[in-house]
Image: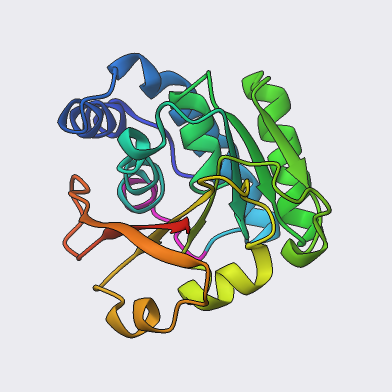
Amino acid sequence: MSPPIDDALRTELETGLRTLGLSTDLATPLLAYLALLLRWNNTYNLTAVRDPREMVVRHLLDSLAMAPHVEGLATLADLGTGPGLPGIPLAIALPGLHVTLVESNGKKARFMREAIRQLKLSNAEVAESRIEAVDRPGAFDAITARALATLPDILAFGGHLPKVDGGRLLAMKGVDPVEEIAALPPGWRVESNTPLDVPGLDAERRLVVVVRT
């Protein structure tokens, strides 16, 4: 059985949302997503993180820490999204953003389709595919990836997806990826490298924005 979604968990999430400058109204749909993830995780092993409170911090709040950097975009492709991180929390928080969740694992893709259906997320879709096989060149304002690969590798797999004029990679990283930045392929440059303050997370997090030149 999955651990319950209790009042203490809601309070912790709402506190984190306030710290991030986001509405506490988001807590209800975010917890519905978390409850579904916990239930499916018992059978399908979608994530190694199993404690609900750890999931609030490492999955929900960690994903939403990048929301200010995504706000204003129209389209985002979340590459190697797993069970929908950060894409589903971002789609919940930013209804004006259309998120394409790219994942080749069939079990994780099925879970995300069910989450989209239950949460009525009209601004999210699943692309069950390897990243390099997604045939939508230049279709997205930005791509993002969370602990997927190095910056050069992410661009090797998915660099065809951002639009030609100003398309971006929003890469969530831990420690400052100095060597990865130095190895960026021609045609890309770092626009910003910003520390992220994730409520409750005792670890370094950064958002590296890489833009087409």
Q: Over which residues does the magenta segment extend?
A: 48-55
166 lies left or right of 11:
right
Q: What count of labels does the image hold?
A: 0
Does the magenta segment cover residue 50? yes
73 lies left or right of 18:
right
- Residue closer to the observer: 142 or 58: 142
Which residue is at 28% across, 80% downward?
178
Q: Is residue 14 above or below residue 181?
A: above
- Residue closer to the observer: 22 or 47: 22
Q: Is residue 128 above or below residue 126?
A: below
Question: What colouring style does the render use?
Answer: rainbow
Which residue is at 63% across, 74% downward?
156
Residue 191 place in picture, x, y as percent: 33, 56
- Residue closer to the observer: 104 or 25: 104
Residue 146 place in picture, x, y as percent: 47, 60
- Residue closer to the observer: 61 or 13: 61
Which residue is at 80% across, 55% downward?
134
Mark yes or no: residue 94 visible: yes
Q: Is residue 183 above or below residue 168?
A: below
Does the magenta segment cover residue 211? no
175 lies left or right of 43:
left
Residue 111 place in picture, x, y as percent: 71, 44
- The outermost residue toward the top is 25
Residue 9 place in picture, x, y as percent: 30, 34
Mark yes or no: residue 1 visible: no
